[in-house]
């Protein structure tokens, strides 16, 4: 059996997902985007909790492709990811012990960077030079 990436229980994962999506539904930017795609919140939250249990606890309960889902959505923009991560980090800090929150945040930021790059690659090619920040 592979040990968890950091100390967190399946119940804590479920709690983080529930608290996070409650915040998402209230968020002025992200709420409408999610509501346009999610029709069954309990099923969505169960699927995302399974994703995190797979990523953190190495359970094999998730079957899906986050990259494909975000690219297929059509209205997910690269600038949404920092907002998503800020809300997620806030949820982690409020919901988990410090060590678990830090470990999960680092993992979420790595996954978010990959998803953002995938979404950026789907953007039309710009004719102007890129804006470097």
Image (tube, rainbow, N blue to C red):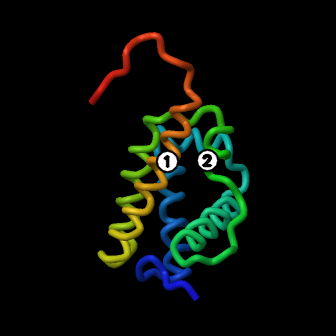
Is 89 above or below relative to 112? below
Is 94 above or below relative to 109? below
Residue furthest to the top in view is 127
What's the residue at 32%, 77% (across, down)?
A: 99
Q: Under tag 1, what secondary structure? A: helix
Left or right, 13 with reference to 89: right
In space, the residues marked 2 and 1 are separated at their CA atoms by 8 Å
Give the labeled residue for mark 1. 114
Asked where in the image residue 75 lies, by quadrant, the reply is top right
What's the residue at 61%, 62% (across, down)?
A: 48
Residue furthest to the left in view is 133
Q: Residues within 10 Å of mark 2 (few under 14, many from 20)?
A: some
Say how many tags the image has: 2
Is 31 above or below relative to 99? above
Asked where in the image residue 93 lies, by quadrant, the reply is bottom left
The residue lying toward the viewer, choosing from 59 and 1, is 1
Give the labeled residue for mark 2. 67
What's the residue at 63%, 39% (across, down)?
A: 71
The residue lying toward the viewer, choosing from 42 and 82, is 82
* Residue 108 rendering spot, x and y as whole percentages: 44, 59
Q: Quadrant of the N terminus?
A: bottom right
Q: Residues within 10 Å of mark 1 (few under 14, many from 20)?
A: few
């Amino acid at each position: 059996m592979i040990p968890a990436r950091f100390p967190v229980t399946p119940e804590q994962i479920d709690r983080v997902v529930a608290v996070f999506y409650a915040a998402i539904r209230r968020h002025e930017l992200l709420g409408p985007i999610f509501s346009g795609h999610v029709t069954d919140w309990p099923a969505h939250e169960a699927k995302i909790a399974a994703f995190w249990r797979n990523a953190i606890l190495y359970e094999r309960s998730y079957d899906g492709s986050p990259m494909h889902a975000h690219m297929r959505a059509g209205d997910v923009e690269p600038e949404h990811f920092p907002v998503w991560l800020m809300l997620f980090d806030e949820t982690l800090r409020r919901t988990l012990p410090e060590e678990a929150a830090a470990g999960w945040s680092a993992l979420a930021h790595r996954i978010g960077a990959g998803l953002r790059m995938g979404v950026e690659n789907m953007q039309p090619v710009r004719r102007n030079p890129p804006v470097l920040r």
